[in-house]
Image (cartoon, grey):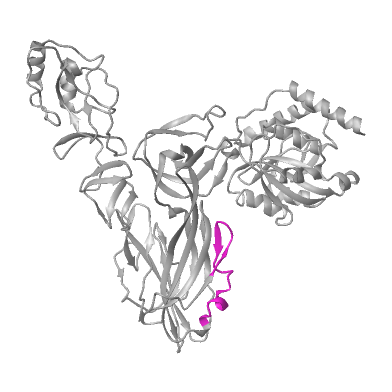
Amino acid sequence: MKLRVISLLLVIAMTLLLIPAPVTTAATTPTEIQQQIRNAYKTALRGSGYSSFYGHCGGLVSWQAYALGIDKKVYACNGNDQFDLYSAMDKTTGGYSIKTYPASKFTLLDALKAISHNGTQDVYNMIVGFQKTNTEAGQRYGHALFVHAIIDGIVYFVECYDANVGGKYYAEGQPISCTIEQFASYYNRWTVFEGVVYFGLKTYADACTRYSCTMKAMAVADGYLYEEPGDPGIHEPKAVDNLVSGQWHTVTGLLRTPNGKYWYEVQVNNRYRYVEAELLTMGSLDASGLALSGLKAPGALRKGYGFTMGGSVQSENAKIRDVRVSVYAANDLATPLCSAAMDVNGKSASLSKSQLNNKLTFRKLPVGTYELRLGVELEIHLLENGQVTTRVEQIDLWDGQFQVVSDWSTYPTVKFDGNGGTAKLDQTVVAKNTTIGSLPTAERSGYAFAGWTLDNAGTKPVTPETAIQKNTTLYAQWTPGHSGNGGWQETEEGWHYCAGNSPVEGWIQFGDLQFYQYSDGTLAKGWAQIEGKLRYFNAAGALITRLDSPSGMEFEVDTDGNGALGWLSTGSQPTGSLDISTEEAQQRLEQIEKMPAAGRAMQKLSAGIYYLAVKITSGQLPQQIQEAMEQQ
């Protein structure tokens, strides 16, 4: 037996030297995936030397993983060994991270739905393992198969035998496609599920360690946006766009490559791009990925009765550390009367499953007015001084008042419609013929919340003194502008720096970068005359304060961004600039006398050779300077 195993390993080793290297371009569409399945099956046959994989499911799985570049090894193991094999690894030899969904926590159907977000997200590359099947051989060796993709809820894979799946016949090696439900139903009939190993798409990001992060960050220097993260000399990523200092980006993750280089993942036009981490600095937490949905909170309670909250909190990128509901007396908001932590599961928390009725002891509250607050702690990771640091940010997600009354009567329901935005409260109840009291706020990107009205058009405003007599829906109203929180804010017109709702006029310092903002909230960009000086700002509004290598006639920018325009002697003339005689220089001087004398004053010419200094870093010259250069 030992000699046979050694021989088999030698055959595998020799075969690996003879077959083509794995293809590393990821297939992502159904047509591409089906062709990928055919190619992988052919590679597996050629590499293994088999004419058929019937009875060799483990070999087919291993060869497909090799053909796709997921693993650089081909493992000689049975079907019921595949899940255990990869569960013991942190990464594959191909650099892929590994995430497992064991049968102890998931059914086959639940595992595939968890990976694909109920079929709404396209996912790629996974191994499904089964402890045993209802066949004689399957009782000993189990079964395994490689799923190439789940796209729009359809599973794409191949089997080592002829199969009838979803009412359709497929020969061995033929790409199979069926719904997630059909897949689970088919295998549940004759196998014992062991688990799913998920690898993901073939990108260098899969080989990186990921840290949760969600923030708005500013570029502190020029650079590039890359298609993937990379490691110098190992994986050189493709630059797809320029990174401009002063430019804002939405960060969705922090990645560490196998060689220890850090990258931020940013979202640009619904695509993920990657920036060298040292080029971005945090501006503010991005809470846009934090959603409060279906909130059901008490507006009024009868004394001695409890209330169970409803709704859920989800975080798109950051880990939720804690979600806590607290009750305060309306006249004392310093110390909670009672509080309870929610059931948190990574990036989600359910309010309805926390049995708040008992934990918050609503039943024991005396008659009076109370405030209910919902707070969230988010965990994010940043790169600071070359080290990954963990920061916990606290967010007050929602607050509202409720009454405890002794005489219970009909309490109408008040619903809140975000009207294009998101209301901080889904619904509440108030005593009939009483004023509504405290009103929730709402949020909408690029808009300032303008209050609530009884109609969608906004013609019937509502105030805390509005009396409610029946079930009512209130509609949020909006005005284009800023959220009122102050600091850097994003609207449909771009980024602005505000104090409350009002843009700040004048100079703005952010780290080592400077910006100038006009009274209407727009940032100075390109050439602008600020405080009597001609200055140049890049496309993101950051002041250019560095000297580039001179070439030709150039416009000089000194270290405070001040433009220098004038005639300089040959003693300071840079290589490649234009030499003209004194007579010609005098003529040129007369031509530009009406130019703004920003920066250095025009020099009075004496005998000698002079040149016109017009130095720029990028962008367009001021019109007057451009005309003068054309006359040269």
* Res 243 visible: yes
Q: How far across and down, in percent of the image, does residue 201 sit? A: 61, 38
Q: How far across and down, in percent of the image, does residue 244 sit? A: 36, 35
- Stretch in magenta: 341-362
* Res 161 visible: no
Residue nearest the observer in this picture, 122 or 617: 617
Q: How far across and down, in percent of the image, does residue 615 sit? A: 23, 24
Residue 106, quarter of the rendered image: bottom right
Q: Is residue 585 above or below residue 475?
A: above
| Residue located at (53% from left, 33% from top) | 230
Residue 331, quarter of the rendered image: bottom left
| Residue located at (90% from left, 30% from top) | 4
| Image quarter (top left, top right, bottom left or bottom right) of the C terminus | top left
Residue nearest the observer in this picture, 267 or 166: 267
Residue 423, quarter of the rendered image: bottom left
In this view, the residue farthest toward the bottom is 407
| Image quarter (top left, top right, bottom left or bottom right) of the N terminus | top right
Is 343 included in the stretch rendered in magenta?
yes
Q: How far across and down, in percent of the image, does residue 210 sit? A: 56, 45
Is 238 left or right of 221, judged from the image as shown? Answer: right
| Residue located at (52% from left, 86% from top) | 304
Is 370 left or right of 349, judged from the image as shown? Answer: left
